[in-house]
Image (cartoon, coloured by chain):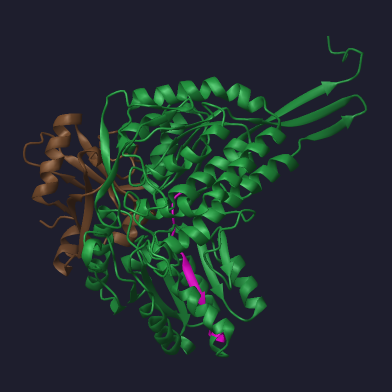
């Protein structure tokens, strides 16, 4: 089955670490300037999602009991929905209130086009 | 041509301390948990100082200091506050070159921009709000012969300000000047990418500001920014950044029932109507400069003209001339006054831009110039440099819809006026826009039809005080750079006074 969001092994490692340090996690994909277009990682429930958001994926990470939800605003999803997202992690410094910043790293989105077959499966 | 020596090396006109604590209550205070983080220069990628890694305990201490100072500061006369702002401006002017080099070294931007724009604009901003607060007055409404409604401006008290990294000093001043003019005490959190230049600024002006009126707490967003933004001890939060954090700050503010001002970026269209090419004159040259403005500050500007819309009838020739102009931009050592394009502010910013260069190509956009990381050699090899890049594609592509925050422009064509406005407004954001035409009617109509807070008309990237700046749509809430920003930092007090000695007659 096609997915909309995957994670790299390095990003999964960081998620396991943050889960152990802080508790259950969620992501909300940002837009706009400065650190826009970065995926923000919060404690599950810290960021209030609503009818203006879309749940793209419930990520299953080995070693993490509960799924990690990945959200985006519905208006932004309209512009991103033809692409597949991979959550990666790179050395970096901060971004909004995202949990990984104090570890000296930054989650980053890498994108590719969804294939026609994937789009059909996801629709 | 001048090449400034790097801070901390022989011949430097400015040096950073090796460590910065929090600035609280007029003095430097170590972080409660004793932790620090390293601060690299994007110019070389090498660390140049360490900075306090603040936590909720430090934020509380800063809020204590701010609350201790707020009442007395709020009662000072407008003349007194204006004098202090003017003195800050004078002190900055006397040290303009040092401030410019300090900001260049921390942010990676070209020193010619900090010398000519960032610092002069910051100085003028203090002077503007010094004047604005002197000229501000309340009102008296004469309701009837015996009853008068007086309206007074009062400060909010203690406000929180969270500053971005793209103009570390100017963006701080955009927020500090109106807040201080209005009589508020401030707790300010600089971006963790650029935490030190504001401390250099403070080292120049600290003696002018009463202790506790401006407090600086450094640290990471989640550890220091969140306790500040969610505190029930602040009367307002001002934030510049991106949409998810903007929503989170509004969410915290809703828990405390306090106002916010937000500036959350854009994807600004820069529209070139066919008559710009009618003559090969100064105006044509200016419009080509306007096209190239996406590379200003390495594209790390919320209003970066990152979508260029060119009318079909002139598309090929104008774009070819634009490519040539951009290929002549001089990228290099940011400390060299000849350098026009410097370094991106951080490694993660560099990585993000590269990820957009990748998805742009995958979506079928054509790279007309640039398109890769730039290795400038020598000790600049470790710095974060990206070639100025021109993509050609269509407005539905992600590189046309997302703020890349790099020196990258996405170009497409339009058929006529209606098509231009349709494409311009086909975006989630509405912060800035550019309109280029020799026809005043087209200029006026386009300017009014574009849903954005600032439409530069036959100009771009001017940021004077006295011109309101802020966003439509998802670009945010509030208007900075103008006396109307005072309203965002003030309460309205109404005294409703009866001068009649007689009972109303109800009871």
Q: Residue furthest left?
A: A62
- Judging depth in this view, the residue of B506 and B48 nearest the camera is B48
Stretch in magenta: B263-276
**In the rendered picture, chain B carries what hue?**
green
Q: Give residue B226's position: percent from left, percent from top.
A: 36, 33
- Judging depth in this view, the residue of B365 and B318 nearest the camera is B318
Q: Give residue B47's position: percent from left, percent from top.
A: 25, 47
Which residue corresponds to the image point at 57% horizontal and 65% vertical from the top-left? B455
Which residue corresponds to the image point at 31% horizontal and 39% vertical from the top-left? B18
Which residue corresponds to the image point at 52% horizontal and 82% vertical from the top-left? B285
B447 above or below B68?
below
B70 above or below B45?
above
A76 above or below B312?
above
Residue B225 is left or right of residue B48, and the answer is right
Residue B327 is left or right of residue B454, and the answer is left
Q: Residue furthest top?
A: B507
Q: Give residue B352's position: percent from left, percent from top.
A: 26, 58
Q: For residue B427, what is the image quadrant?
A: bottom left
Q: Is residue B271 magenta?
A: yes
- Judging depth in this view, the residue of B303 and B439 nearest the camera is B303
**In the rendered picture, chain A carries what hue?**
brown
B451 above or below B88?
below
Kindly tell me whether residue B232 is visible in this rendering. Answer: no
Q: Give residue B212's position: percent from left, percent from top.
A: 51, 26
Q: Is residue B414 magenta?
A: no
């Amino acid at each position: 089955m096609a997915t909309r969001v995957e994670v790299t092994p390095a990003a999964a490692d960081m998620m396991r670490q943050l889960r152990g340090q802080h508790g259950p996690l969620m992501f909300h994909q940002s837009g706009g300037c400065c650190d826009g277009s970065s995926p923000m990682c919060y404690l599950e429930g810290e960021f209030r999602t609503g009818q203006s958001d879309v749940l793209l994926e419930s990520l299953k990470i080995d070693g993490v009991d509960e799924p990690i939800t990945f959200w985006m605003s519905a208006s932004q999803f309209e512009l991103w929905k033809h692409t597949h997202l991979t959550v990666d992690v790179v050395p970096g410094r901060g971004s909004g209130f995202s949990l990984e910043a104090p570890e000296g790293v930054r989650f980053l989105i890498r994108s590719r086009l969804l294939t026609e077959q994937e789009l059909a499966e996801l629709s | 041509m001048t090449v400034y020596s790097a801070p901390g090396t022989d011949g430097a006109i400015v040096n950073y301390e090796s460590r910065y604590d929090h600035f609280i209550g007029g003095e430097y205070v170590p972080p409660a948990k004793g932790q620090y983080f390293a601060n690299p220069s994007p110019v070389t990628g090498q660390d140049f100082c360490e900075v306090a890694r603040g936590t909720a305990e430090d934020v509380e201490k800063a809020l204590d200091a701010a609350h201790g100072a707020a009442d007395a500061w709020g009662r000072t006369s407008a003349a007194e506050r204006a004098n202090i702002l003017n003195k800050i401006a004078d002190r900055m002017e006397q040290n303009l070159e040092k401030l410019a080099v300090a900001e260049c070294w921390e942010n990676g931007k070209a020193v010619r921009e900090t010398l000519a724009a960032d610092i002069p604009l910051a100085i003028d901003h203090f002077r503007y709000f010094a004047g604005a607060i002197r000229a501000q007055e309340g009102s008296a409404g004469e309701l009837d012969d015996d009853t008068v409604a007086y309206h007074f401006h009062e400060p909010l008290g203690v406000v929180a300000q969270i500053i971005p990294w793209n103009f570390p000093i100017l963006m701080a001043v955009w927020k500090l000047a109106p807040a201080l003019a209005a009589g508020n005490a401030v707790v300010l959190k600089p971006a963790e990418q650029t935490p030190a230049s504001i401390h250099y600024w403070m080292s120049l002006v600290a003696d002018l500001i009463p202790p506790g009126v401006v407090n600086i707490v450094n640290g990471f967003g989640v550890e220091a920014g969140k306790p500040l933004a969610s505190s029930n001890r602040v009367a307002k939060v001002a934030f510049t950044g991106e949409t998810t954090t903007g929503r989170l700050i509004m969410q915290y503010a809703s828990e405390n029932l306090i106002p916010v001002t937000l500036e959350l970026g854009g994807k600004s269209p820069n529209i070139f109507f066919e008559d710009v090419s009618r003559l090969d004159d100064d105006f044509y040259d200016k419009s080509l400069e306007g096209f190239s403005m996406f590379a200003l500050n390495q594209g790390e500007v919320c209003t970066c003209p990152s979508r260029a819309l060119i009318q079909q009838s002139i598309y090929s020739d104008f774009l070819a001339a634009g490519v040539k102009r951009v290929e002549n931009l001089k990228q290099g050592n940011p400390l060299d006054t000849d350098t026009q394009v410097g370094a991106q502010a951080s490694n993660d910013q560099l990585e993000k831009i590269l990820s957009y260069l990748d998805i742009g190509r995958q979506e079928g956009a054509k790279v007309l110039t640039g398109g890769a990381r730039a290795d400038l050699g020598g000790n600049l090899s470790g710095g974060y440099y990206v070639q100025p890049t021109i993509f050609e594609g269509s407005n539905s592509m992600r590189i046309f819809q997302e703020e890349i925050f790099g020196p990258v422009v996405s170009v497409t064509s339009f058929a006529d006026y209606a098509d231009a406005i349709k494409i311009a407004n086909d975006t989630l954001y509405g912060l800035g826009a550019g309109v280029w035409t020799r026809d005043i009617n087209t200029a006026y109509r386009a300017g009014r039809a574009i849903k954005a807070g600032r439409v530069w008309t036959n100009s771009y990237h001017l940021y004077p005080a006295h011109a309101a700046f802020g966003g439509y749509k998802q670009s945010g809430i509030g208007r900075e750079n103008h006396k109307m920003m005072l309203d965002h930092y003030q309460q309205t007090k109404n005294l409703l006074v009866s001068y009649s000695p007689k009972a109303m007659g109800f009871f």
